[in-house]
Amino acid sequence: MTASAQQAPTTTPVRVEKDLPVCTKGVSNPDGSTRTYQDYALCMAAEINKAIDSFGAGNYEQAVEDINEAYFGWYENALEPPSMTLPGNRKVKMEGRFTRVKLAIRNNPSDPSIPDKLDLIKTAVARDAMVLDGALPDSSPESAGKKLLTEKKKEPVDESKMNSVDFITAFTLLLREGLEALLVVTAIILYLVTSGNRKLCKAVYLGVAAAVVLSFVLAWGMQKIVGGAGAASEMIEGFTMFIAVAMLFYVSNWMLGKTSGQNWQHYIQGMVTTSVSSGAAKALVFAAFLAVIREGAELVLFYTAAFAGGGHNPLWIGLGFGAGIVVLAVIFVIFRYGGARMPVRPIFMGTSILLFIMCISFVGKGVQELKEASFILGDTNLPWMKYYFPELGIYPQAETILPQLILLVASVWIIVHHTMSNRSASRDRDTAGQKNPTATPV
């Protein structure tokens, strides 16, 4: 029996906040004033109220659509980016709540607690909005958001708090999205330099530059075609992640292969250069390009959504962006020039392992994007995971952890295989040296 055919709950939730007006999209209120985070929370709450009404009427599919509008239309665009600055992984927790309540409506609509879960989302988002506006301290409980919903009266905005939120949001977004792409590009550049293929670095840099430019084009296209946010956008981002995983896994395995057995001996005997085939060179450039354009397009969309309104301070946004650029540049210099001074073989091994780690991170994030788009159904929470790192794509959910574990096992197997091959080659060299003492040591 489908969800829509099942009997509706007999109890209707009693909501203390009634008659919240449904908002029109934009950055301004009907009176012309600039919307604050509290305004966006009230607009989102109005959509949640529509979902509760649809659910109470037994129209479950419409309830899910109303929740999607609340999330993609209001939360993801206006409130999700700055919520990353709040302690306690608020972004991840709220994403999980939206996903779980939609699954509950689809799978068990007779559950009488569903309206309460929707009310909890409204209250939690209202609390976060008040914190972002400086109307509440960070330590405030979620129940503090009820005041905004019941009184529908916004607290005054703390300008200094808003400035700090603008700075931290701009800095965090750039560091969060840029660091992954930077690590991939740096690993590839470092490999090319240490393997004597410095001439190919120019192609990688050109690929990165092209990716930066095309990031704006891709973001513009996503904005025009799918609205920049929504299930379609999440699906595009998710599948792009999986393409990046395939490319990085191939590149990291190829790099690691250069450190094992006869491949390493050929490299050593050639003194400083091991040629990179045309196909491998294209794969390296494309891997760097793909990592940058995926993160770049998402960064453009995040910045557009986070700072579209007129209530933000361009100075503090610019300072946050500039600080992020400086940090990324320092990280690049440390890895690029510090790594080049290290022994060659550990560099090859280290860059390969780093790219394997990025693959695992991208898999988790790709699955999470598809979960948000409702392409992957299910939200199996893992309560034993007390600590998780969304920045690395590690979430307390079986749907993300399982493919990551599979990829981890495959990566470890490949690394162990190459390591054993190295040891075998080393023993063969020692045996050959004992039989031929006059041979020149490697």
Image: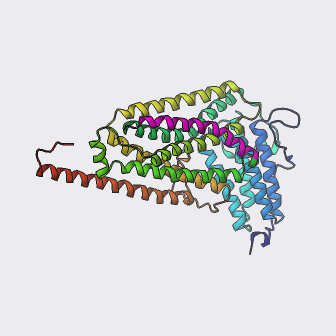
In this view, the residue in front, 59 or 441, is: 441
Q: Is residue 211 magenta?
A: yes
Residue 198, image x and y in percent? 42, 35
Asked whether the viewer can see residue 250, the reply is yes
Q: Residue at x 66, y 35 (%)?
A: 137
Q: Quadrant of residue 23?
A: top right
Residue 365, image x and y in percent? 57, 51
Residue 54, image x and y in percent? 82, 60
Q: Is residue 169 above or below residue 428?
A: above
Asked whether the viewer can see residue 387, the reply is no
Quick check: 123 left or right of 10?
left
Magenta residues span: 196-224
Quick check: 75 left or right of 285?
right
Quick check: 66 left or right of 79?
right
- Please tell me whether the stretch drawn in magenta is mainly helix, strand or loop: helix
In this view, the residue in front, 113 or 188, is: 188
Residue 18, image x and y in percent? 85, 50
Q: Residue at x 43, y 33 (%)?
A: 336
Quick check: 140 left or right of 418?
right
Q: Quadrant of the C terminus?
A: top left
Q: Quadrant of the N terminus?
A: bottom right
In this view, the residue in front, 146 or 297, is: 297
Residue furthest front in the image: 278
Residue furthest top in the image: 315
Q: Is residue 286 magenta?
A: no
In this view, the residue in front, 148 or 172, is: 172
